[in-house]
Amino acid sequence: MDRRCRFCADEFDETFVDLGLSPLANSFVPRERADTTEPVYPLHARACRACGLVQLPQFEPAASIFDQYLYDSSYSESWLRHCESYAAAMIARAKLGATSEVIEIRQQ
Ligand SMILES: [Zn+2]
């Protein structure tokens, strides 16, 4: 298992929190697979001492996580209110205007 930090490439091994084994979050088990054992994965978050990034050394590819994913953020009123409030706060803090560009950086 690769224990190189995905941000700074330093080796890391410090436990941040070990929650044992867990199924994928918000995964949907269809009726035809209801009597099978749901796969579980280690949920052992570790911290990089060099840069502070907390990360899972082992993780599933996005296609596995989102293939049968139940949660849709647009259905959660409280989440939408939080996002609106957070966006307004960040716009004010960064003094963003009509010509500003905002990007989202995600790992695929
Ligand atoms: Zn790091």
Image: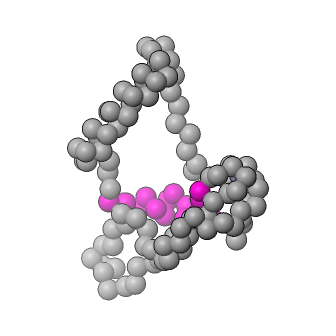
Question: What x and y, as percent, mark residue 100?
Answer: 50, 18
Who is closer to the viewer here, 102 or 55? 55
Q: Is residue 60 magenta?
A: yes
Q: Residue at x 73, y 49 (%)?
A: 8
Q: Residue at x 30, y 81 (%)?
A: 34
Question: What x and y, as percent, mark residue 41?
Answer: 51, 74
Residue 25 located left or right of residue 13: left
Q: Residue at x 32, y 33 (%)?
A: 84
Question: What x and y, as percent, mark residue 30?
Answer: 30, 73
Does the rendering let one see residue 41?
no
Who is closer to the viewer here, 79 or 92? 92
Question: What x and y, as percent, mark residue 40?
Answer: 47, 77
Does the rendering let one see residue 48?
yes
Residue 57 located left or right of residue 62: right
Q: Is residue 48 magenta?
A: no
Residue 49 located left or right of residue 42: right
Who is closer to the viewer here, 7 or 16? 16
Q: Is residue 25 above or below residue 88?
A: below
How did the renderer colour the structure? one colour
Residue 11 located left or right of residue 93: right
- Provide the residue span drawn in magenta: 54-70
Q: Residue at x 38, y 34 (%)?
A: 86
Quadrant containing the N terminus is: bottom right
Q: How many labels, in total?
A: 0
